[in-house]
Image: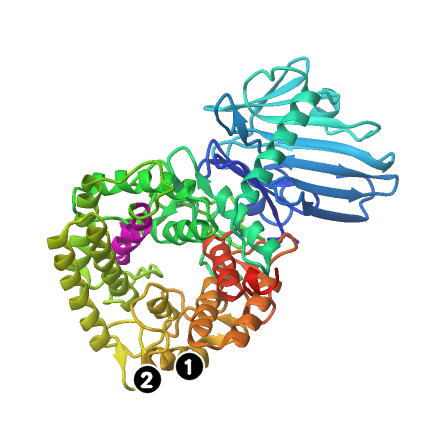
């Protein structure tokens, strides 16, 4: 049965997902939101196309792990006549004074015991699974020719066996380079080995520069590498996840395309990676943000964009795909680009704020950048008391959501801080006045005396875990009796063991049946701020156990079965691991 126990390789240009049997079941080219040339993940339980597999005769056991502190994945397959090892990577390293990150997969296969008999199956598709490519052959390569794209597999393995998918004895190592229709310079084995070794060296160097908490270092490193792989370095965009249409819950119809850049999610990613001491992602994202703000001309900002800043993300259903485990529909595009989600203005300004203060950043922000952000701030002030779809992107109702108004406050508050940094005294007073006005309104209208809690919308009575962000963004002291009471009420209503539901009220599809992982991390953060550290640590440890065998989380966890659901890997969830570890870890100085 298909599961989300999937390895990830990527190079900040594209990515691929690999199941425990070493099958590449998901890979979009030429970028995250491109055509899924390998798509078996969403093609039902027994897909015959859209995969790159190494079949071993008489499979008895599988193992999978990452090479420590890298994005290089090792899979071992054990069969009746022997065992083999597959090493997969997406090359990423410095070459000729720049980062080399080709849209290329490197697979290296070697026997490790006996003489395993294997068959190689390379079955890409084009046109979102509707076109089978034509194949042509060269001396050491196979070309997969589609209407708009041609891909090439280069190898020294017998091409007849690859084309016919014939079983053969693996008596020596073989290598594969799969990607653009370009000639591989140099020998295949030498190139594959060189690319892998240099990629390992790159990731070792990147991890060595992380400022890690003392505890849970392996979990934080895996989360950081995963988040890094979700960045599209060419533009600075950050995708919410690498997949589309993994259901949020079994047969729920809650199947969405997350292969785009939500400005909300991207802010949390940037802040988490920044907290580990690496700033390049923030600098790249700042450029992406400033272009978006400039494009808006001081008007409406949509909550989500394509990785190349595409505005139209028209949502459609792909009927030719059966869906993950046969649970459709499969969607391409996301209607959320049409939504009005007013928290976006705060997320833009929060995402850009640190760059005005951080002396490590080479690119120095100017008054021009500040003026552009002020345009977003004006929108935040104007809309803080207006109904919207909210951060949960409700499609059938509109309210003045507390979390949206909260982020509008954060926009004005941070602009006051930035103005002070820029020496703009009059603008400090201007934005502080607006922030104070919004804060007063939130405290008055989002508090429910009946529920003894801040509620999901102004004048409402239902609970929503997003109000826990009040303490995280500095809106309220975590020990304020109103916030403490809110945490208590949220736990009573929405906690199921360590897991946390998003909200009480039914939505477009009814009441959710799975827990949203980031909400559990918001809960433990709030508990730690209040002083309930041991409870917070218990929840954190439980969430670490909810990860798959490779240390990665999707969007949702079923609170009863513990099974992972929702798109994968979910950046929100991986952010929670980093933030939780930093919040709860013992300090280094207490041990060394």
Left or right: residue 78 compared with residue 417: right
Residue segment shown in magenta:
338-355
Query: Residue 514 placed where, x, y %?
Result: 50, 67
- Quadrant for the N terminus, please: bottom right
Give percent across and percent down for residue 539.
55, 71
Residue at x 59% of width, y 68% of height: 542
Q: Is residue 369 visible?
A: yes
Q: Is residue 463 above or below residue 183?
A: below
- Magenta residues, dominant SS class: helix
On whether residue 144 falls in the magenta region, the answer is no
Q: Which residue is mark 1?
A: 488
Place of residue 74 in the rendered image (x, y in percent of width and height, measured from the top left): 69, 41
Q: Which residue is mark 2?
A: 452
Q: How is the image coloured?
A: rainbow
147 sits left or right of 336 in the view: right
The residue nearer to you, when weighing 541 against 493, is 541
Q: Is residue 353 magenta?
A: yes
């Amino acid at each position: 049965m298909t599961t989300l126990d999937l390895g990830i390789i990527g190079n900040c240009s594209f990515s691929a997902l690999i199941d425990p049997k070493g099958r590449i079941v998901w890979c979009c080219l030429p970028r995250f939101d491109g055509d899924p040339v390998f798509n078996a993940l969403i093609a039902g339980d027994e897909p015959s196309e859209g995969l790159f597999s190494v079949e071993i005769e008489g499979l008895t056991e599988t193992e999978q792990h990452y090479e420590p502190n890298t994005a290089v994945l090792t899979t071992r397959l054990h069969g009746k006549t022997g065992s083999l090892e597959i090493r997969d990577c997406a090359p990423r390293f410095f070459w000729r004074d720049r980062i080399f990150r080709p849209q290329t997969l490197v697979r290296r296969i070697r026997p490790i015991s006996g003489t395993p008999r294997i068959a190689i199956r390379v079955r890409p598709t084009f046109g979102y699974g509707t076109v089978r490519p034509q194949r042509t052959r060269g001396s050491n390569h196979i070309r997969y020719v589609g209407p708009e794209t041609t891909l090439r597999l280069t190898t020294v393995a017998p091409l007849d066996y690859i084309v016919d998918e014939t079983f053969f004895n693996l008596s020596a190592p073989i290598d594969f380079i799969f990607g653009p229709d370009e000639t591989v310079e140099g020998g295949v084995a030498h190139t594959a080995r060189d690319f892998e070794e240099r990629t390992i060296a790159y990731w070792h160097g990147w991890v060595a520069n992380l400022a890690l908490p003392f505890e849970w270092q392996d979990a934080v490193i895996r989360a950081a590498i995963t988040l890094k792989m979700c960045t599209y370095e060419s533009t600075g965009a950050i995708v919410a996840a690498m997949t589309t249409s993994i259901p949020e819950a079994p047969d729920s119809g809650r199947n969405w395309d997350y292969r785009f850049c939500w400005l909300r999610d991207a802010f949390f990613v940037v802040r988490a990676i920044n907290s580990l001491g690496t700033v390049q992602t923030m600098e790249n994202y700042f450029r992406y943000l400033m272009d978006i703000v400039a494009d808006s001309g001081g008007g409406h900002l949509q909550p989500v964009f394509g990785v190349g800043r595409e505005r139209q993300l028209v949502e459609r259903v792909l009927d030719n795909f059966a869906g993950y485990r046969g649970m459709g529909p499969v969607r391409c595009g996301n209607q959320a680009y049409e939504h009005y989600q007013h928290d976006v203005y705060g997320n833009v300004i929060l995402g850009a704020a640190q760059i005005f203060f951080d002396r490590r950043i080479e690119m120095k922000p100017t008054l021009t950048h500040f003026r552009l952000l002020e345009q977003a701030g004006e929108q935040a002030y104007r809309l803080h008391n207006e109904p919207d779809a909210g951060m949960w992107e409700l499609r059938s109702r509109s309210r003045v959501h507390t979390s949206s108004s909260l982020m509008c406050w954060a926009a004005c508050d941070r602009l006051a801080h930035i103005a002070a940094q820029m020496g703009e005294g009059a603008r400090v007073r201007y934005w502080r006045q607006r922030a104070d006005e919004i804060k007063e309104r939130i405290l008055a209208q989002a508090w429910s005396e009946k529920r003894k809690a801040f509620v999901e919308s102004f004048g409402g009575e239902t609970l929503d875990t997003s109000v826990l962000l009040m303490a995280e963004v500095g809106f309220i002291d975590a020990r304020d009796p109103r916030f403490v009471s809110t945490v208590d009420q949220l736990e009573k209503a929405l906690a199921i063991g360590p897991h946390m539901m998003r909200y009480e009220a039914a939505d477009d599809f009814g009441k959710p049946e799975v827990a949203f992982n980031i909400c559990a991390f918001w809960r433990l953060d709030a508990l730690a701020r209040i002083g309930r550290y041991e409870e917070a640590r218990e929840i954190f440890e439980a969430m670490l156990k909810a990860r798959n065998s490779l240390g990665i989380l999707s969007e949702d966890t079923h609170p009863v079965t513990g099974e992972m659901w929702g798109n994968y890997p979910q950046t929100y969830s991986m952010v929670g691991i980093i933030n939780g570890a930093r919040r709860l870890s013992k300090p280094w100085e207490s041990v060394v």
